[in-house]
Amino acid sequence: MNQTTACPLDCYDACRIVVDECGKLKGDKSHPVTRGYLCPNLNHFTEQERILSPKLRGEEISMERAIEVLIEALKNSKNEDILYYRGSGNIALMQRVCEHFFASIKAIGTSGSLCDGAGEAGVLLGRGYNEVLSPQMIKESEVIIFWGRNPHTTHSHLLPFLEGKTVIVIDPIKTAMAQKADLHIQIKPHCDIHLALLLSRFAIIEGLHDEEFLEEHATEYNDFYELTQTVRIKATLDAIDVTLGQIGTMLELMKGKKSAILVGVGVQKYRNGADVLRSIDGFGAVMGLFGKNGCGVSYLGDSLRGITLPFASISHRVSKPTADFSKYNCVFVQGGNPLAQMPNSTRVKRGFDLAGFSVYFGLYENETSQAADLVIPAKTFLEKNDFRSSYGDYTLQEMPQIVENEIGISEYALTSRLSEAFGVELMSESYYLDFFRKRIDVRDGVGYHRDIPDVPYKTGFSNGEFAFADEIDLEIDQEEGFYLITSKYAKGLNSQFKRAEGVCFHPEAGFAEDEIVQLASPSGTVDMRVRYDERLRRDCLLIYSGTPDVNVLTPPHLSYEGESAVYQETKIKVTKK
Ligand SMILES: Nc1nc2c(c(=O)[nH]1)N[C@H]1C(S)=C(S)[C@@H](COP(=O)(O)OP(=O)(O)OC[C@H]3O[C@@H](n4cnc5c(=O)[nH]c(N)nc54)[C@H](O)[C@@H]3O)O[C@H]1N2
Ligand SMILES: Nc1nc2c(c(=O)[nH]1)N[C@H]1C(S)=C(S)[C@@H](COP(=O)(O)OP(=O)(O)OC[C@H]3O[C@@H](n4cnc5c(=O)[nH]c(N)nc54)[C@H](O)[C@@H]3O)O[C@H]1N2
Ligand code: SF4
Ligand SMILES: [Mo]
């Protein structure tokens, strides 16, 4: 008999999967978004080579022994010397049960984000809370603006919803979407604030702003208009590599149309990432895009929206992007590969080596599993019970256990063993599963959260009204070197599955294809092979997320708001070898 589950991978889509009698995974044709197909990452999921047995310093051991060793290491550490670090390899809800144990023994956790935290902080400052536009809501739009977001790679199930719409792309790379778009603004990286302010200013000059909306929901717009007037037009357009004609065309295409701006993480991998989102939101507010059917500004949402977790939550935390593993006697890494994916990875690796005892709890071998003292294999999503919410829509889906085998241990089972050893109170697995099940509202055969909006922000903003930024740093980076773009790879998922290699340049950037170049930033130096990619600007280089050693180059700073990593806040000097 076919069984139904959902994909747990870190992705805007939350595909519904049908598992047939032979264990083959297929997209669910009856699901309004998945529509019968899955992406390459999931199509090859069951062929992935996974860790089969626990290991202690490279030697295979039994699961029983691994749990004993883990308990011993935890018992030998004071609570404040234990760090619990969770990645985003599997973003389903029961994964968080491990935190219940670590919170109960008062271990240290992490706060902030490697992902969308800077942008999220900007959204919250302006709007008070973060709502997304689901694909079904986007279907109602007439104009779609992809701003630093690459749907062919990262949100492929959105593509069928775009038919017949006007598409605008703002991206330093001529992405697949940019190639088909009605307008592509191939902006210089890290210049989105300037563009958003100029768009707002010209919208007001040309009378395209929504006065009624602004009077009701964003009354400080005159101050914002004044702020936009501090941008020097000609000098700024030259500096950001955008023309007045492009601004005019974009506003003309949006005029009187239902427009949705879909913003990705690309724009906010900088220290001022919150200001970027807030400026784009400011433009959205000027155009009156909030609270109207088919309109809006949609960023990555909060996948825990509307869900209070039934687990204890850690109270003492250190910032995730800058966590120093060397300070801890015991580091427990779950579902992540910080040694490759955290910024400034040379420092991260050194710190991990200096930690008293390190544990990796995951599915696949990677830089972190290779360096950990103890490796504990996890069960896959097919082998355990879970629930999947999403940061791209409002679904909440059950993921029942489908496969039974002896490999690995589930998050719940491991937590249960640890809780028993430390006298931590833990409810039964079925209690937690029931808790999540009760939060599902099934409509037309699809599970959703309860209380989702028909139209986000229809009833206004939780701060009372939209809060425009009143001060923004408009300096443009003049440092020498190439802009670093580090975005997602189509054949992999961050460091899972297939990993990209090499550095991409425009063919006219001055390097020969296949030559090895040395890349240097203040954080470190790496050698990489040159690949050509005509979609790039000549002043940028592209190294995909998951490429080994990309993060040797990325800086150890936090965003000004949101405690986020700022992968692109650096220029790269390139020398021929
Ligand atoms: N296949 C695949 N899918 C994924 C992932 C994956 O690794 N592989 N990862 C998942 C995860 S963790 C996330 S967070 C999402 C992210 O999904 P997206 O937001 O789509 O992520 P990125 O690929 O990082 O960035 C998107 C675009 O931003 C552009 N960009 C870079 N810098 C700038 C800039 O300064 N200004 C502007 N305007 N654009 C810029 C890049 O060229 C890129 O096209 O994708 C998820 N989906
Ligand atoms: N240079 C650069 N660096 C980046 C980014 C970038 O764009 N460029 N993107 C950043 C972003 S947006 C993100 S979200 C992070 C992602 O970084 P991480 O959260 O570290 O994610 P992954 O690299 O996908 O590693 C996930 C690991 O989780 C494990 N895993 C998978 N499923 C399960 C499970 O069910 N249980 C357990 N216990 N483990 C499991 C797998 O073994 C896998 O190796 O990377 C960030 N780093
Ligand atoms: S598109 Fe995303 S949710 Fe769908 S199968 Fe692929 S990784 Fe999973
Ligand atoms: Mo992410």
Image (cartoon, helix red, strand yellow):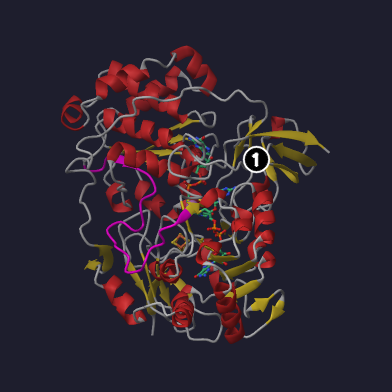
Q: Which residues are magenta?
A: 293-317
Q: Position of residue 567 (x, y in %)?
A: 57, 42
Q: What residue did someone put label 1 on?
A: 533
Front position in the image: 319 or 10: 319
On the image, which quarter does residue 482 sit in? top right
Q: Residue at x 47, y 39 (%)?
A: 268
Q: Secondary structure at mark 1?
A: loop
Identity of the residue furthest to the right in this view: 577
Q: Is residue 530 above or below residue 470?
A: below
Check disc 1 and give the amino acid type.
Asp
Q: Is residue 400 above or below residue 496?
A: below
Q: Quadrant of the C terminus?
A: top right
Q: Is residue 298 above or below residue 472?
A: below
Front position in the image: 280 or 565: 565
Q: Position of residue 450 (x, y in %)?
A: 22, 62
Chief secondary structure of the magenta span?
A: loop
Residue 310 lies in the magenta stretch: yes
Side of 446 relative to 269 (left or right):
left
Q: Is residue 104 above or below residue 268?
A: below
Q: Quadrant of the N terminus?
A: bottom left
Q: Position of residue 135 (x, y in %)?
A: 33, 52
Side of 453 relative to 230 (left or right):
left
Q: Is residue 241 visible?
A: no
Give the crowd class for mark 1: few <14, some 14-19, many >=20 residues within 10 Å: some
Residue 248 lies in the magenta stretch: no
Q: Position of residue 307 (x, y in %)?
A: 29, 62
Q: Residue at x 59, y 75 (%)?
A: 376
